Image (spheres, rainbow, N blue to C red):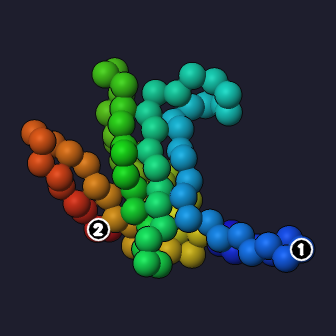
């Protein structure tokens, strides 16, 4: 997947993606995240799940596969636990 495009005199660069965990676009979602591209690195931020859903191995794999498809090898995850920011690079 390309991260840049041109239309006329405009250059477009993919910098942020909003992600929703749902079986079908437009349906209610049970989790969400924002993928931000900063200094050439993909960061998964604002990862939130509804009470009856947990971020699991399949979720991790889906996000990683999408991000790898953008051309990034590593994924940086930021979450808050007990009011402390935890960052994981994978």
In the image: residue 9, left or right of residue 90: right
Residue 38, horizontal then vertical, whole percent:
44, 71
Disc 2 on helix, strand or loop? strand
How far from the left and from the top, in percent, is residue 23? 61, 31
Q: Position of residue 73 (x, y in %)?
A: 45, 76
Identify the image quadrant of residue 7.
bottom right
Give the residue pinned by disc 2: 89
Point 51% across, 36% down: residue: 21
Distance Cα–Cα, label 2 vs label 1: 37 Å
Q: Nearer the viewer, residue 28 or 6?
A: 6
Q: Which residue is mark 1?
A: 8
Nearer the observer, 74 or 34: 34
In this rendering, position of residue 10 left or right of residue 57: right
- Identify the residue at horizontal 67%, vertical 28% (top origin): 26
The N terminus sits in image quarter: bottom right
The quadrant of the image that shows the C terminus is: bottom left
Q: Residue at x 31, y 22 (%)?
A: 51
Q: State left or right for residue 17 relative to residue 53.
A: right
């Amino acid at each position: 997947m390309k991260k840049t495009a041109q239309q006329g005199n405009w250059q477009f660069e993919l910098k942020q993606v909003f992600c929703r965990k749902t079986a079908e676009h437009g349906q209610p979602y049970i989790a969400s995240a924002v993928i931000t591209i900063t200094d050439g690195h993909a960061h998964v931020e604002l990862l939130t799940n509804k009470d009856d859903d947990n971020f699991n191995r399949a979720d991790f794999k889906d996000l990683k596969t999408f991000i790898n498809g953008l051309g990034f090898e590593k994924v940086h995850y930021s979450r808050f636990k007990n009011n402390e920011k935890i960052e994981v690079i994978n």
